[in-house]
Image (cartoon, rainbow, N blue to C red):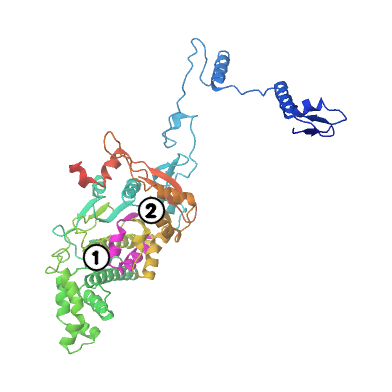
Protein backbone atom coordinates (compact mmCIF):
# COMPACT_ATOMS: atom_id res chain seq x y z
CA UNK A 1 0.00 0.00 0.00
CA UNK A 2 1.29 3.47 -0.92
CA UNK A 3 1.36 5.81 2.04
CA UNK A 4 1.24 9.59 2.08
CA UNK A 5 2.66 11.33 5.11
CA UNK A 6 1.49 14.89 5.87
CA UNK A 7 3.00 17.32 8.34
CA UNK A 8 1.13 20.13 10.10
CA UNK A 9 4.16 22.38 9.62
CA UNK A 10 3.38 22.57 5.84
CA UNK A 11 1.59 25.69 4.57
CA UNK A 12 -1.85 24.81 3.07
CA UNK A 13 -3.33 27.11 0.48
CA UNK A 14 -5.52 25.03 -1.82
CA UNK A 15 -8.98 23.67 -0.90
CA UNK A 16 -7.66 20.13 -1.11
CA UNK A 17 -4.89 20.89 1.35
CA UNK A 18 -7.37 22.68 3.61
CA UNK A 19 -9.56 19.59 3.83
CA UNK A 20 -6.58 17.44 4.65
CA UNK A 21 -5.34 19.85 7.25
CA UNK A 22 -8.58 19.47 9.22
CA UNK A 23 -7.68 15.85 9.81
CA UNK A 24 -4.13 16.51 10.83
CA UNK A 25 -2.98 17.24 14.30
CA UNK A 26 0.39 17.43 15.91
CA UNK A 27 1.02 13.86 14.92
CA UNK A 28 1.30 12.44 11.40
CA UNK A 29 -1.44 10.65 9.45
CA UNK A 30 -1.11 7.81 7.01
CA UNK A 31 -3.76 7.77 4.22
CA UNK A 32 -4.41 5.42 1.38
CA UNK A 33 -4.87 6.52 -2.25
CA UNK A 34 -8.61 5.96 -1.96
CA UNK A 35 -8.85 8.25 1.05
CA UNK A 36 -6.84 10.94 -0.72
CA UNK A 37 -9.10 10.76 -3.81
CA UNK A 38 -12.24 10.94 -1.66
CA UNK A 39 -10.95 13.98 0.17
CA UNK A 40 -10.01 15.71 -3.10
CA UNK A 41 -13.53 15.16 -4.49
CA UNK A 42 -15.07 16.57 -1.36
CA UNK A 43 -12.79 19.60 -1.49
CA UNK A 44 -13.73 20.30 -5.12
CA UNK A 45 -17.44 20.20 -4.29
CA UNK A 46 -16.93 22.56 -1.39
CA UNK A 47 -14.79 25.01 -3.41
CA UNK A 48 -16.62 28.10 -4.82
CA UNK A 49 -17.38 27.81 -8.52
CA UNK A 50 -15.90 30.49 -10.87
CA UNK A 51 -18.35 32.96 -12.35
CA UNK A 52 -18.85 32.32 -16.07
CA UNK A 53 -18.84 35.16 -18.57
CA UNK A 54 -22.23 35.58 -20.23
CA UNK A 55 -22.44 34.21 -23.74
CA UNK A 56 -23.16 36.15 -26.89
CA UNK A 57 -26.89 35.47 -26.76
CA UNK A 58 -27.07 36.46 -23.11
CA UNK A 59 -25.24 39.70 -23.79
CA UNK A 60 -27.50 40.54 -26.73
CA UNK A 61 -30.60 39.91 -24.61
CA UNK A 62 -29.21 42.04 -21.80
CA UNK A 63 -28.35 44.89 -24.15
CA UNK A 64 -31.78 44.61 -25.77
CA UNK A 65 -33.50 44.83 -22.40
CA UNK A 66 -31.40 47.82 -21.40
CA UNK A 67 -32.08 49.64 -24.68
CA UNK A 68 -35.79 49.65 -23.85
CA UNK A 69 -35.01 52.33 -21.30
CA UNK A 70 -31.84 53.91 -22.75
CA UNK A 71 -31.08 54.03 -26.52
CA UNK A 72 -28.12 51.85 -27.48
CA UNK A 73 -25.92 51.69 -30.57
CA UNK A 74 -28.81 50.26 -32.59
CA UNK A 75 -31.43 52.76 -31.32
CA UNK A 76 -34.51 52.28 -29.07
CA UNK A 77 -35.42 48.60 -28.66
CA UNK A 78 -39.15 49.09 -28.09
CA UNK A 79 -42.35 49.54 -30.02
CA UNK A 80 -41.94 52.47 -32.42
CA UNK A 81 -38.29 52.80 -31.52
CA UNK A 82 -36.96 51.54 -34.88
CA UNK A 83 -33.98 49.46 -33.72
CA UNK A 84 -31.40 48.51 -36.34
CA UNK A 85 -30.38 44.88 -36.50
CA UNK A 86 -27.24 45.48 -38.63
CA UNK A 87 -25.19 48.68 -38.86
CA UNK A 88 -23.27 49.10 -42.12
CA UNK A 89 -19.92 50.85 -42.32
CA UNK A 90 -20.32 54.48 -43.35
CA UNK A 91 -19.66 55.38 -46.99
CA UNK A 92 -16.24 56.97 -47.44
CA UNK A 93 -15.63 59.64 -50.06
CA UNK A 94 -12.58 61.69 -50.93
CA UNK A 95 -12.45 65.22 -52.21
CA UNK A 96 -10.99 68.66 -51.76
CA UNK A 97 -12.00 71.02 -48.96
CA UNK A 98 -14.20 72.90 -51.44
CA UNK A 99 -16.03 69.75 -52.53
CA UNK A 100 -16.74 68.15 -49.15
CA UNK A 101 -17.22 71.23 -46.98
CA UNK A 102 -20.97 70.47 -46.70
CA UNK A 103 -20.27 67.15 -44.96
CA UNK A 104 -19.05 68.81 -41.77
CA UNK A 105 -18.50 67.60 -39.08
CA UNK A 106 -18.04 64.08 -40.43
CA UNK A 107 -14.68 64.86 -42.07
CA UNK A 108 -11.17 63.55 -41.44
CA UNK A 109 -8.14 65.30 -42.89
CA UNK A 110 -5.56 63.34 -44.90
CA UNK A 111 -2.35 62.57 -43.05
CA UNK A 112 -0.08 62.84 -46.12
CA UNK A 113 0.78 66.16 -47.80
CA UNK A 114 -1.55 66.88 -50.69
CA UNK A 115 1.09 68.23 -53.07
CA UNK A 116 1.16 67.07 -56.67
CA UNK A 117 -1.04 64.92 -58.87
CA UNK A 118 -3.56 62.66 -57.08
CA UNK A 119 -2.21 59.17 -57.69
CA UNK A 120 -4.57 56.89 -55.81
CA UNK A 121 -5.48 55.41 -52.45
CA UNK A 122 -3.01 54.56 -49.69
CA UNK A 123 -3.07 50.79 -49.20
CA UNK A 124 -2.78 50.98 -45.41
CA UNK A 125 -4.37 54.29 -44.36
CA UNK A 126 -6.96 54.52 -47.14
CA UNK A 127 -6.07 58.20 -47.62
CA UNK A 128 -5.27 60.05 -50.81
CA UNK A 129 -1.69 59.78 -52.10
CA UNK A 130 -0.40 62.66 -54.22
CA UNK A 131 2.91 63.39 -55.89
CA UNK A 132 4.69 64.12 -59.15
CA UNK A 133 8.29 65.12 -59.94
CA UNK A 134 7.52 68.69 -61.02
CA UNK A 135 5.23 69.73 -58.14
CA UNK A 136 7.49 68.17 -55.52
CA UNK A 137 10.54 69.84 -57.06
CA UNK A 138 8.84 73.25 -57.07
CA UNK A 139 7.89 72.79 -53.40
CA UNK A 140 11.40 71.75 -52.38
CA UNK A 141 10.51 68.17 -51.43
CA UNK A 142 12.94 66.70 -53.96
CA UNK A 143 16.04 68.21 -55.53
CA UNK A 144 15.57 66.97 -59.10
CA UNK A 145 12.36 66.99 -61.23
CA UNK A 146 12.78 63.41 -62.39
CA UNK A 147 11.04 60.10 -61.76
CA UNK A 148 11.69 56.47 -62.63
CA UNK A 149 9.07 53.71 -62.92
CA UNK A 150 9.96 50.02 -62.63
CA UNK A 151 7.54 47.12 -62.89
CA UNK A 152 6.70 43.98 -64.79
CA UNK A 153 4.62 44.27 -67.99
CA UNK A 154 0.87 44.57 -67.55
CA UNK A 155 0.90 45.99 -64.02
CA UNK A 156 -0.03 49.59 -64.78
CA UNK A 157 3.16 51.55 -65.46
CA UNK A 158 1.61 53.26 -68.47
CA UNK A 159 -1.61 53.96 -66.55
CA UNK A 160 0.37 55.75 -63.87
CA UNK A 161 2.05 57.90 -66.54
CA UNK A 162 -1.36 58.70 -68.03
CA UNK A 163 -2.49 60.01 -64.64
CA UNK A 164 0.60 62.23 -64.41
CA UNK A 165 0.06 63.51 -67.95
CA UNK A 166 -3.62 64.30 -67.39
CA UNK A 167 -3.08 66.29 -64.21
CA UNK A 168 0.13 68.09 -65.18
CA UNK A 169 -1.30 69.17 -68.54
CA UNK A 170 -4.29 70.67 -66.70
CA UNK A 171 -1.83 72.64 -64.55
CA UNK A 172 -0.07 74.17 -67.57
CA UNK A 173 2.80 71.68 -68.00
CA UNK A 174 3.36 70.59 -71.62
CA UNK A 175 3.65 66.79 -72.09
CA UNK A 176 6.18 65.42 -74.58
CA UNK A 177 6.22 61.73 -75.51
CA UNK A 178 9.15 61.53 -77.86
CA UNK A 179 9.05 57.86 -78.90
CA UNK A 180 5.73 56.00 -78.57
CA UNK A 181 6.48 52.55 -79.95
CA UNK A 182 3.20 50.70 -79.33
CA UNK A 183 1.49 53.37 -79.38
CA UNK A 184 0.16 53.95 -75.86
CA UNK A 185 0.00 57.72 -75.67
CA UNK A 186 -1.38 58.79 -79.06
CA UNK A 187 -5.06 58.71 -77.93
CA UNK A 188 -4.19 60.74 -74.84
CA UNK A 189 -2.34 63.45 -76.75
CA UNK A 190 -5.16 63.63 -79.29
CA UNK A 191 -7.65 64.03 -76.44
CA UNK A 192 -5.56 66.95 -75.17
CA UNK A 193 -5.65 68.56 -78.62
CA UNK A 194 -1.94 67.96 -79.08
CA UNK A 195 0.32 67.17 -82.02
CA UNK A 196 0.88 63.61 -83.30
CA UNK A 197 3.97 63.16 -85.51
CA UNK A 198 4.04 59.77 -87.26
CA UNK A 199 7.49 58.53 -88.23
CA UNK A 200 8.17 55.06 -89.63
CA UNK A 201 9.01 53.46 -93.01
CA UNK A 202 6.53 54.82 -95.52
CA UNK A 203 5.05 57.26 -93.00
CA UNK A 204 6.77 60.59 -92.58
CA UNK A 205 10.32 61.87 -92.96
CA UNK A 206 12.73 63.34 -90.42
CA UNK A 207 16.02 64.88 -91.42
CA UNK A 208 18.45 64.27 -88.51
CA UNK A 209 20.41 67.38 -89.55
CA UNK A 210 17.32 69.59 -89.11
CA UNK A 211 16.61 70.49 -85.48
CA UNK A 212 13.57 72.56 -86.40
CA UNK A 213 12.60 76.17 -87.13
CA UNK A 214 12.74 77.15 -83.47
CA UNK A 215 16.44 76.29 -83.39
CA UNK A 216 17.01 78.37 -86.52
CA UNK A 217 15.34 81.34 -84.80
CA UNK A 218 18.17 81.43 -82.24
CA UNK A 219 19.93 83.72 -84.70
CA UNK A 220 17.38 86.39 -83.72
CA UNK A 221 18.82 86.74 -80.20
CA UNK A 222 20.18 90.27 -79.88
CA UNK A 223 22.95 89.63 -77.37
CA UNK A 224 25.91 88.30 -79.33
CA UNK A 225 27.37 86.24 -76.50
CA UNK A 226 24.02 84.63 -75.61
CA UNK A 227 23.38 83.95 -79.30
CA UNK A 228 26.74 82.24 -79.78
CA UNK A 229 26.24 80.10 -76.66
CA UNK A 230 22.81 78.95 -77.84
CA UNK A 231 23.95 78.20 -81.39
CA UNK A 232 27.05 76.31 -80.26
CA UNK A 233 24.91 74.17 -77.97
CA UNK A 234 22.69 73.19 -80.89
CA UNK A 235 25.72 72.55 -83.10
CA UNK A 236 27.05 70.20 -80.44
CA UNK A 237 23.66 68.47 -80.17
CA UNK A 238 23.49 67.92 -83.91
CA UNK A 239 27.03 66.55 -84.01
CA UNK A 240 26.40 64.15 -81.11
CA UNK A 241 23.18 62.94 -82.71
CA UNK A 242 24.83 62.23 -86.06
CA UNK A 243 27.81 60.53 -84.42
CA UNK A 244 25.46 58.31 -82.43
CA UNK A 245 23.36 57.31 -85.43
CA UNK A 246 26.46 56.66 -87.57
CA UNK A 247 27.91 54.52 -84.78
CA UNK A 248 24.72 52.44 -84.74
CA UNK A 249 24.96 51.89 -88.48
CA UNK A 250 28.58 50.72 -88.16
CA UNK A 251 28.11 48.74 -84.97
CA UNK A 252 31.10 50.49 -83.37
CA UNK A 253 32.09 53.97 -82.15
CA UNK A 254 33.44 56.37 -84.73
CA UNK A 255 37.20 56.73 -84.90
CA UNK A 256 38.63 60.16 -84.03
CA UNK A 257 39.28 61.21 -87.64
CA UNK A 258 35.80 60.03 -88.68
CA UNK A 259 34.15 62.03 -85.92
CA UNK A 260 36.21 65.10 -86.77
CA UNK A 261 35.42 64.96 -90.48
CA UNK A 262 31.71 64.45 -89.83
CA UNK A 263 31.63 67.50 -87.56
CA UNK A 264 33.62 69.67 -89.97
CA UNK A 265 31.49 68.65 -92.96
CA UNK A 266 28.22 69.51 -91.18
CA UNK A 267 29.54 72.87 -90.01
CA UNK A 268 30.79 73.73 -93.50
CA UNK A 269 27.35 73.08 -94.98
CA UNK A 270 25.31 74.83 -92.27
CA UNK A 271 27.41 76.79 -89.75
CA UNK A 272 24.56 78.91 -88.30
CA UNK A 273 21.71 76.35 -88.34
CA UNK A 274 19.80 78.38 -90.92
CA UNK A 275 19.53 75.87 -93.78
CA UNK A 276 19.88 72.22 -92.76
CA UNK A 277 21.46 70.00 -95.45
CA UNK A 278 20.15 66.57 -96.37
CA UNK A 279 22.02 63.31 -95.83
CA UNK A 280 22.65 63.02 -99.57
CA UNK A 281 24.19 66.49 -99.69
CA UNK A 282 26.45 65.58 -96.78
CA UNK A 283 27.60 62.43 -98.60
CA UNK A 284 28.29 64.39 -101.79
CA UNK A 285 30.30 66.98 -99.87
CA UNK A 286 32.52 64.34 -98.25
CA UNK A 287 32.98 62.56 -101.58
CA UNK A 288 34.11 65.81 -103.22
CA UNK A 289 37.30 65.67 -101.11
CA UNK A 290 37.35 69.35 -100.07
CA UNK A 291 40.61 70.75 -98.79
CA UNK A 292 39.24 71.33 -95.30
CA UNK A 293 38.53 67.60 -94.93
CA UNK A 294 41.84 66.55 -96.50
CA UNK A 295 43.66 68.45 -93.76
CA UNK A 296 41.74 66.62 -91.04
CA UNK A 297 42.19 63.20 -92.65
CA UNK A 298 45.88 63.89 -93.25
CA UNK A 299 45.52 62.88 -96.90
CA UNK A 300 46.59 66.06 -98.64
CA UNK A 301 47.25 64.80 -102.16
CA UNK A 302 46.41 61.11 -102.04
CA UNK A 303 42.79 60.55 -103.13
CA UNK A 304 43.02 56.82 -102.48
CA UNK A 305 44.12 57.30 -98.88
CA UNK A 306 41.37 59.90 -98.36
CA UNK A 307 38.70 57.54 -99.66
CA UNK A 308 40.07 54.63 -97.66
CA UNK A 309 40.10 56.50 -94.35
CA UNK A 310 36.53 57.81 -94.78
CA UNK A 311 34.97 54.78 -96.48
CA UNK A 312 33.36 53.44 -93.29
CA UNK A 313 31.85 56.83 -92.45
CA UNK A 314 30.48 57.12 -95.98
CA UNK A 315 29.02 53.61 -95.74
CA UNK A 316 27.11 54.59 -92.61
CA UNK A 317 25.79 57.81 -94.14
CA UNK A 318 24.83 56.10 -97.41
CA UNK A 319 22.86 53.55 -95.37
CA UNK A 320 20.82 56.48 -94.02
CA UNK A 321 20.34 57.92 -97.51
CA UNK A 322 17.66 57.21 -100.11
CA UNK A 323 19.50 54.17 -101.47
CA UNK A 324 20.14 52.72 -98.02
CA UNK A 325 18.31 50.12 -95.98
CA UNK A 326 15.79 52.59 -94.58
CA UNK A 327 14.70 54.27 -97.79
CA UNK A 328 13.87 57.94 -97.54
CA UNK A 329 13.01 57.99 -93.82
CA UNK A 330 16.09 60.10 -93.04
CA UNK A 331 16.88 61.28 -96.58
CA UNK A 332 14.10 63.80 -97.28
CA UNK A 333 13.27 67.12 -95.57
CA UNK A 334 11.31 66.81 -92.33
CA UNK A 335 7.60 67.02 -93.08
CA UNK A 336 6.65 67.91 -89.49
CA UNK A 337 8.27 69.91 -86.72
CA UNK A 338 7.47 70.16 -83.03
CA UNK A 339 5.11 73.03 -82.24
CA UNK A 340 6.35 74.68 -79.02
CA UNK A 341 3.89 74.83 -76.14
CA UNK A 342 1.62 72.08 -77.50
CA UNK A 343 1.47 68.46 -76.20
CA UNK A 344 3.32 66.28 -78.70
CA UNK A 345 3.90 62.58 -79.31
CA UNK A 346 6.11 60.85 -81.87
CA UNK A 347 4.25 57.77 -83.09
CA UNK A 348 6.95 55.28 -84.11
CA UNK A 349 4.74 52.19 -83.81
CA UNK A 350 5.28 51.41 -87.51
CA UNK A 351 9.01 50.84 -87.03
CA UNK A 352 9.97 47.17 -87.18
CA UNK A 353 10.67 46.26 -83.56
CA UNK A 354 12.93 43.40 -84.66
CA UNK A 355 15.32 45.93 -86.21
CA UNK A 356 16.84 47.10 -82.95
CA UNK A 357 19.29 49.43 -84.71
CA UNK A 358 16.51 51.28 -86.53
CA UNK A 359 14.38 51.49 -83.38
CA UNK A 360 17.27 52.94 -81.40
CA UNK A 361 18.16 55.39 -84.18
CA UNK A 362 14.57 56.63 -84.39
CA UNK A 363 14.26 56.90 -80.61
CA UNK A 364 17.49 58.84 -80.24
CA UNK A 365 16.48 61.17 -83.09
CA UNK A 366 13.05 61.89 -81.58
CA UNK A 367 14.45 62.41 -78.08
CA UNK A 368 17.12 64.77 -79.37
CA UNK A 369 14.63 66.80 -81.43
CA UNK A 370 12.34 67.24 -78.44
CA UNK A 371 15.13 68.17 -76.05
CA UNK A 372 16.65 70.58 -78.57
CA UNK A 373 13.30 72.31 -79.15
CA UNK A 374 12.76 72.85 -75.43
CA UNK A 375 16.32 74.08 -74.91
CA UNK A 376 15.99 76.52 -77.83
CA UNK A 377 12.76 77.88 -76.38
CA UNK A 378 14.48 78.44 -73.03
CA UNK A 379 17.26 80.41 -74.74
CA UNK A 380 14.68 82.53 -76.57
CA UNK A 381 12.69 83.05 -73.37
CA UNK A 382 15.83 84.26 -71.57
CA UNK A 383 16.29 86.78 -74.40
CA UNK A 384 12.68 87.93 -74.10
CA UNK A 385 11.68 86.43 -77.46
CA UNK A 386 9.25 83.76 -76.24
CA UNK A 387 7.21 82.73 -73.21
CA UNK A 388 8.92 80.39 -70.76
CA UNK A 389 7.18 77.04 -70.34
CA UNK A 390 7.62 73.87 -68.30
CA UNK A 391 7.73 70.53 -70.11
CA UNK A 392 7.24 66.96 -68.93
CA UNK A 393 9.31 64.47 -70.93
CA UNK A 394 8.22 60.80 -71.06
CA UNK A 395 10.98 58.33 -71.99
CA UNK A 396 9.24 54.95 -72.23
CA UNK A 397 10.67 51.58 -73.34
CA UNK A 398 14.15 52.62 -72.22
CA UNK A 399 15.50 49.13 -72.76
CA UNK A 400 15.07 49.33 -76.55
CA UNK A 401 17.64 52.03 -77.18
CA UNK A 402 20.10 50.47 -74.72
CA UNK A 403 19.85 47.09 -76.47
CA UNK A 404 20.78 48.60 -79.83
CA UNK A 405 24.01 50.23 -78.71
CA UNK A 406 25.77 50.36 -75.36
CA UNK A 407 27.18 53.74 -76.27
CA UNK A 408 23.68 55.23 -76.36
CA UNK A 409 23.78 55.22 -72.57
CA UNK A 410 26.05 58.27 -72.78
CA UNK A 411 23.58 60.00 -75.09
CA UNK A 412 20.72 59.43 -72.62
CA UNK A 413 22.94 60.39 -69.71
CA UNK A 414 23.74 63.74 -71.32
CA UNK A 415 20.07 64.52 -71.99
CA UNK A 416 18.85 63.59 -68.51
CA UNK A 417 21.60 65.43 -66.64
CA UNK A 418 20.81 68.78 -68.25
CA UNK A 419 17.01 68.70 -68.23
CA UNK A 420 16.61 70.38 -64.85
CA UNK A 421 18.35 73.54 -66.02
CA UNK A 422 16.07 73.71 -69.06
CA UNK A 423 12.78 73.55 -67.16
CA UNK A 424 12.10 69.93 -68.12
CA UNK A 425 10.67 67.34 -65.78
CA UNK A 426 11.05 63.75 -66.88
CA UNK A 427 9.96 60.20 -66.20
CA UNK A 428 11.82 57.13 -67.46
CA UNK A 429 10.09 53.75 -67.68
CA UNK A 430 11.41 50.22 -68.03
CA UNK A 431 10.66 46.76 -66.69
CA UNK A 432 13.53 45.74 -64.41
CA UNK A 433 16.97 46.82 -63.31
CA UNK A 434 18.36 44.06 -65.53
CA UNK A 435 17.27 46.16 -68.51
CA UNK A 436 19.96 48.61 -67.41
CA UNK A 437 22.67 45.96 -67.10
CA UNK A 438 24.99 46.45 -70.09
CA UNK A 439 28.00 44.61 -71.48
CA UNK A 440 30.57 46.59 -69.47
CA UNK A 441 30.57 47.46 -65.80
CA UNK A 442 31.16 51.18 -66.26
CA UNK A 443 28.27 51.38 -68.73
CA UNK A 444 26.03 49.53 -66.27
CA UNK A 445 27.02 51.97 -63.54
CA UNK A 446 26.06 54.87 -65.81
CA UNK A 447 22.69 53.30 -66.64
CA UNK A 448 21.93 52.52 -62.99
CA UNK A 449 22.72 56.15 -62.30
CA UNK A 450 19.46 56.99 -64.10
CA UNK A 451 17.61 55.42 -61.18
CA UNK A 452 19.93 56.84 -58.51
CA UNK A 453 19.51 60.39 -59.82
CA UNK A 454 15.73 60.06 -60.06
CA UNK A 455 14.43 61.77 -56.95
CA UNK A 456 11.09 59.96 -57.17
CA UNK A 457 10.93 56.22 -57.86
CA UNK A 458 7.75 54.17 -58.37
CA UNK A 459 8.20 50.43 -57.85
CA UNK A 460 5.53 48.05 -59.14
CA UNK A 461 5.39 44.28 -59.07
CA UNK A 462 8.86 42.75 -59.43
CA UNK A 463 10.29 39.24 -59.21
CA UNK A 464 12.12 38.17 -56.03
CA UNK A 465 15.36 37.88 -58.02
CA UNK A 466 15.17 41.60 -58.75
CA UNK A 467 15.40 42.64 -55.10
CA UNK A 468 19.19 42.30 -55.01
CA UNK A 469 19.57 44.72 -57.91
CA UNK A 470 17.27 47.24 -56.27
CA UNK A 471 19.08 47.09 -52.94
CA UNK A 472 22.29 48.11 -54.69
CA UNK A 473 20.61 51.42 -55.53
CA UNK A 474 18.52 52.19 -52.42
CA UNK A 475 17.37 50.60 -49.18
CA UNK A 476 14.27 48.38 -49.08
CA UNK A 477 12.54 46.98 -46.02
CA UNK A 478 11.37 43.37 -45.86
CA UNK A 479 7.74 44.52 -45.95
CA UNK A 480 8.34 46.57 -49.12
CA UNK A 481 10.01 43.61 -50.82
CA UNK A 482 7.15 41.32 -49.80
CA UNK A 483 4.59 43.72 -51.28
CA UNK A 484 6.38 43.96 -54.62
CA UNK A 485 6.75 40.20 -54.99
CA UNK A 486 3.10 39.62 -54.02
CA UNK A 487 1.97 42.01 -56.75
CA UNK A 488 3.39 39.74 -59.47
CA UNK A 489 0.67 37.12 -58.91
CA UNK A 490 -1.59 36.09 -61.76
CA UNK A 491 -5.29 36.92 -61.96
CA UNK A 492 -7.98 34.52 -60.71
CA UNK A 493 -10.23 32.94 -63.36
CA UNK A 494 -13.99 33.00 -62.73
CA UNK A 495 -15.26 29.41 -63.29
CA UNK A 496 -18.66 30.70 -64.49
CA UNK A 497 -17.47 33.22 -67.08
CA UNK A 498 -14.03 31.66 -67.77
CA UNK A 499 -12.60 35.17 -67.67
CA UNK A 500 -9.87 36.41 -65.40
CA UNK A 501 -10.22 39.35 -63.09
CA UNK A 502 -7.60 42.06 -62.81
CA UNK A 503 -4.20 40.94 -61.61
CA UNK A 504 -3.86 41.54 -57.86
CA UNK A 505 -0.91 43.85 -58.38
CA UNK A 506 -2.40 45.93 -61.21
CA UNK A 507 -1.97 49.62 -60.45
CA UNK A 508 -0.09 48.96 -57.20
CA UNK A 509 3.12 50.89 -56.57
CA UNK A 510 5.49 51.93 -53.81
CA UNK A 511 6.54 55.57 -54.05
CA UNK A 512 10.12 55.95 -52.81
CA UNK A 513 11.95 59.18 -52.07
CA UNK A 514 15.61 58.55 -51.35
CA UNK A 515 16.18 56.24 -48.39
CA UNK A 516 12.87 57.08 -46.73
CA UNK A 517 10.22 54.37 -46.25
CA UNK A 518 8.01 53.98 -49.29
CA UNK A 519 4.34 54.87 -49.63
CA UNK A 520 2.24 51.98 -51.01
CA UNK A 521 -0.78 52.99 -53.07
CA UNK A 522 -3.10 51.76 -55.79
CA UNK A 523 -3.83 53.92 -58.82
CA UNK A 524 -7.52 54.62 -59.42
CA UNK A 525 -8.40 55.70 -62.97
CA UNK A 526 -11.53 57.42 -64.17
CA UNK A 527 -13.63 55.95 -66.99
CA UNK A 528 -12.08 58.36 -69.50
CA UNK A 529 -8.58 57.45 -68.34
CA UNK A 530 -9.39 53.75 -68.74
CA UNK A 531 -10.48 54.40 -72.31
CA UNK A 532 -7.37 56.30 -73.38
CA UNK A 533 -4.89 54.14 -71.43
CA UNK A 534 -5.90 50.75 -72.83
CA UNK A 535 -2.67 49.08 -73.93
CA UNK A 536 -4.43 45.99 -75.35
CA UNK A 537 -6.28 47.61 -78.25
CA UNK A 538 -4.72 45.16 -80.69
CA UNK A 539 -6.72 42.35 -79.05
CA UNK A 540 -10.14 44.00 -79.19
CA UNK A 541 -11.21 42.23 -82.41
CA UNK A 542 -10.55 38.73 -81.03
CA UNK A 543 -12.19 39.15 -77.63
**Where residue 263 sits: x, y (%)?**
25, 75
The residue positioned farthest toward the right in the image shown: 26
Tag 2 residue: 463
Quarter of the image where the N terminus is located: top right
Image point (22%, 45%), residue name: 537
Number of residue marks: 2
Image point (45%, 44%), residue name: 114
Q: Residues within 10 Å of mark 1 (few under 14, many from 20)?
A: some
**Where residue 381 sits: x, y (%)?**
33, 59
Q: Secondary structure at mark 1?
A: helix
Magenta part, dominant SS:
helix
Image point (86%, 28%), residue name: 25
Q: Nearer the viewer, mark 2 or mark 1?
A: 2
Image point (18%, 76%), residue name: 314
352 within the magenta span: no
Part of the protein shown in magenta: 390-419
| Residue 163 relative to residue 201: left or right | right
Tag 1 residue: 216
**Where residue 496 sits: x, y (%)?**
28, 33
**Viewer-closest of 95 and 410:** 410
**Where residue 361 sits: x, y (%)?**
23, 65
| Residue 287 relative to residue 160: left or right | left
**Viewer-closest of 477 and 41:** 41
Q: Is residue 285 above or below residue 438?
A: below
Q: Which badge, 2 or 1, comes first in the chain's sequence? A: 1
Amino acid sequence: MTLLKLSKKRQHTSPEDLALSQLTESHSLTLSKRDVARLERAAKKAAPKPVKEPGLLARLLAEGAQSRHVPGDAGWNRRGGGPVNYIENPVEIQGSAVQVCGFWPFVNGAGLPTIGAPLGRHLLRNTLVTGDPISWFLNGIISNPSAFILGQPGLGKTSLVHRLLAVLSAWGVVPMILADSRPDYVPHIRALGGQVITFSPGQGHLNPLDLGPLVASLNEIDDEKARDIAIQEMVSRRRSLMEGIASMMLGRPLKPHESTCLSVAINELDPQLRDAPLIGELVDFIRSRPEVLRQNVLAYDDDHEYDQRLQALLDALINLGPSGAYGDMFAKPSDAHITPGVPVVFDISGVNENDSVLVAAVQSLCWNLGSATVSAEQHLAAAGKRQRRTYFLVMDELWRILRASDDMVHFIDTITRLNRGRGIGQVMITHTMNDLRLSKEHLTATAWGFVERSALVFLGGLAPSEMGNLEEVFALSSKEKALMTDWTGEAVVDPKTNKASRRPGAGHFIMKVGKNPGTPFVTQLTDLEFEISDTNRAWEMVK
